[in-house]
Amino acid sequence: MRSVLVTGPGTTEVREVPRPECGDDDVLIAVKACGICGSDAMYTAVGGIPPRQGATPLGHEPAGEVVAVGRNVTGIGEGDHVVVNPMAAIDGIIGSGGAQGALSDLIVIREARAGVHLRVIPPHVPWEVAALNEPMAVARHAVNRTSPKPGDTAVVFGAGPIGLGAVISLKLAGAAHVVAVDLVPNRLEKALAVGADAVINSAEEDVAARLAELHGTARAGLVSGAKPGTDIYLDAAGAPAVLETALASAKHGATLGIVAVHKRPASVDFGRLLTTELTIVLSMGYPSEIFEVTDDLIANWEKYALIVSDTVPFGRVREALTLAATPGAAEKVVVTF
């Protein structure tokens, strides 16, 4: 079968590799769609992930159709449409250093358990939308880490796929008013379409001043002064300016969540922040959220479909990887089979 491998720094190849065998406890899946994540570009740039450096299978956002089921597996049948938990694979995280990558014709889920390793979805959900399940779980975990309460106000920096997913999850958690901040008008339009209450173009507007207009003002800390009344700041952009804006704007008792990958160290003046009693939380992966998002994805697939900007057939997968890695060229690229 075909599989995309990182074979050196900045180099990917589509290679013929052995077809995986389906044992008595396993499920074999024909991949129908796989999203491309920003981490795929990072893995490619450095030449893989040790200890598999130089031969790293790519792809960790799969959706597919079950083509074989081991005799000991229950709750899964041939022909079922499924989404997958890449982090639960016993042979390593799929597409992130494990033995398999989902930018392949087939993947096998060893010792498969329904609800743990994969979940059945109805066939009316388009494959490219189903492939959003994994990144939407990343967004859901980021939101969960900020502990939103009904009535909270929030701002999400970065209206890419994770930021858009965070907007959706914040509204589902009961946030009264959610603002999306970005530089790209098309992304801001999508943020409104998926449920943001307002948007801010940070290239044209003063973010703190606009937040104060939208969320009112509140005590800055134990000293005098006023800041925007925003309860939750979520960084899904990874730009130094985002941290600077959030830290300078945060009111007393606010929460700052960081899900974006910052590629350079950030300097934080904790002395200046001390009186704000700001809570800072970091987010990675989806310890329990991988199938928490699935019901909403199924019920509102048309809304989630707005997140996908490009679908590219597997025959042009290297073009898809280049497109996804080019800043400003695309928002969410999904490879279809």
Image (tube, rainbow, N blue to C red):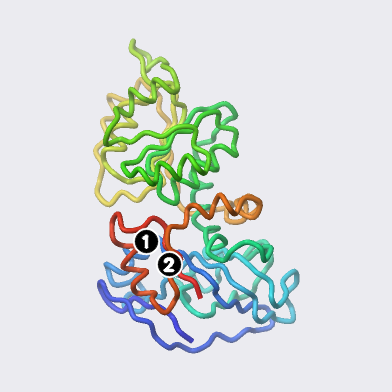
Give the percent coordinates (x, y) of residue 129.
55, 60
Looking at the image, is 315 positioned above or below residue 124?
below
- Residue under the image location 36 percent in, 15 percent down: 226
Looking at the image, is 78 positioned above or below residue 114?
below
Name the kind of residue labelled 2 in the image: Ser
Identify the residue position indicated by label 2 in the image. Answer: 96
Looking at the image, which is closer to me, 133 or 138?
133
Q: Residues within 10 Å of mark 1 (few under 14, many from 20)?
A: some
- Position of residue 135 in the picture relative to residue 226 (left or right): right
**Between tags 2 and 1, which lies in front?**
1
Name the kind of residue labelled 1 in the image: Ser
Looking at the image, which is closer to me, 253 or 81?
81
Give the percent coordinates (x, y) of residue 292.
62, 51
Identify the residue position indicated by label 1 in the image. Answer: 39
Give the percent coordinates (x, y) of residue 52.
37, 75
| Residue 255 quadrant | top left
Q: Residues within 10 Å of mark 2 (few under 14, many from 20)?
A: many
Say whether disc 2 or disc 1 marks the residue closer to the N-terminus: 1
